[in-house]
Amino acid sequence: MAEGEITNNSSKEGVNENKNNKSCINGTDKTSEKKASMKDPETFCCLLQPGNADSSPDYIGIRRFLLARKAESSSYRRLDWRCNGKGYVAYRNYMRRPRKWEKLQTPSRPSTPGNSGPWNSRSGSFSHLFDAESWNSSKDQRSGSVGSTNRSSSLSDSDRPRQRGVEPAYSFVGMHCIFDQCKAAAVTVLKFGHMSSDLLAYGASDGTLVVCSVSDPPSVLKQLNGHSKDVTDFDFSSNNQYIASSSKDKTVRVWELSKGLCIRIIYGVSPQLCIRFHPVNNNFLSVGNANKDITVFNFSTGRIITKSNFDSEVTSMDHDHTGQLIFCGDAQGCIYTASMESRTGALSRSHRYKSGNKLKCPVATVQYRSFSLMTKGPVLLSCTQDGSLSFFSINLESQGYLTLRCSLKLTSRIHTIRASFCPLLSLDKGEYIVAGSEDTHVNFYDLTRPKHTCVNKLQGHGFPVIGVAWNHGENLLASSDLYGVVIVWKRAKTK
């Protein structure tokens, strides 16, 4: 009986071993099936559904595994961008790209982080990609020095794919350079020098004024410190030897660029909001302020020549090309025309255009142009803080009488955002305007279109874009944002 018991026990042990082996085999099969099913996204969705109490440990484990794989994949992709000489901003822009880009890829060059699709400037999709190749690492962007210069794109302008019927107006090949000297202070105003394609200056909300050269390689020439509050406006003299700046600290300062010194300070009784040199007689300096007047100073002595009162704070101004007219906007949305004597500097109000908008919003931009395709004569552009773009024709024979030709209503803005005329491309194309926006884009509008006026967008800023300016050669566009970054964009060559 003892031997029989031993035999039965051994047989039971053999059966148990077989069961264990079968269970192990079944376990490996189930594991392999799970591994194979993990490649199927639909299986993932099923596995992620909450189950009963018995399957909850598997659900939690699978969920943690998937989340870990997701984070690991993202980190590897960001690391791949850094290895290719690009930063996180370029990676973010690549991940946020519209799906239309994928349809426009050429079969010979697949879409990769270093070779994104084209940008169609008329339809809103992309026909000339500025790419992210001008971005260096995020450390370089915030280093406090001059930003990275644009590397040449892998596709030349002639090799870039274009669709039939696509308008190549205002397409850009990349970022020429980036400046970020203002240390997170908003760049409130920026301008290129008179008759200059390389000299760029910009003022910030911390009171600094930075003068740069955008020639290759780009560099910072001077950093002018003296204002204690926001730089509201500045202007170059006709020979670019001097800069006159206005500020909310109630002062006007005159700077000599060659030495980087402030050679004159003019004290006021209210914030100084806009400033212009006379285009013919640079000895006249016109300043608009919060005291509801325009004051004309003698540039050489700093003494007041004349004053002219208005109905509200003078927030923006511009001269015509002869210097005989001044166009200015106030805090109530009105546009004024004033006559100016080029010999004595005497001012006299001529006309006032009052907007029909019930919301009284400050005029952020007043810009004069001597010729337009729409009017075949001089025109004026105004931009108010509520997002209204107005386009006026100017009658010089009646002392600058303004006639509204068209207007465009954009979304209302919280910040003071400026706009500018775009260069004339040819005699058979529309009237284009470029403006910043609070959605971090630089937008291009065609005023001749009743619908779909936005013809192009530049994406690269991380904060609201509040300033734009063209250089004299009209091949570079500078834009500034609320965080102190200035990007200089290089325009594509047009035939």
Image: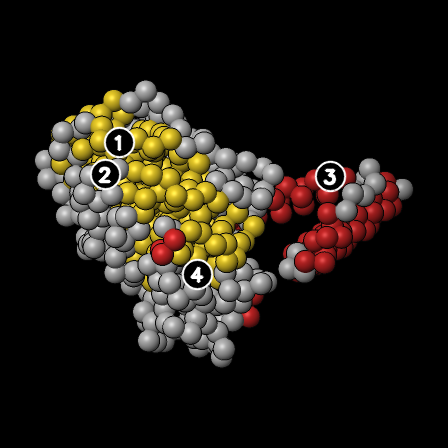
Note whether residue 331 is visible: yes
Q: Which quadrant of the structure image shows residue 157? A: bottom left
Mark with earlier residue (2, 3): 3
* Residue on which disc 4 sits: 432
Percent position of residue 466, x then y:
42, 42
Mark 3: secondary structure: helix
Single out the mark in the foreground, 3 or 1: 1
Single out the mark in the foreground, 2 or 3: 2
Per the rendering, the mark at residue 345 is: 2
Q: Is residue 329 above or below residue 134?
A: above
Q: Nearer the viewer, residue 60 or 325?
A: 325
Give the distance between the C-alpha atoms of the residues marked 4 and 3, in whole angstroms.
62 Å
Mark with earlier residue (2, 1): 1
Determine contact: label 2, label 1, CB under 8 Å. yes
Mark with earlier residue (4, 3): 3
Give the distance between the C-alpha atoms of the residues marked 3 and 1, in whole angstroms.
84 Å
* Residue on which disc 1 sits: 306
Note whether residue 14 is visible: no
Q: Is residue 184 above or below residue 419?
A: above
Q: Identify which residue is drawn at 67% across, 60% down.
A: 40
Residue type indicated by callout 2: Gly
Label 2, residues with CA under 10 Å away: few <14, some 14-19, many ≥20: many
Image side of residue 129 versus residue 294, left or right: right
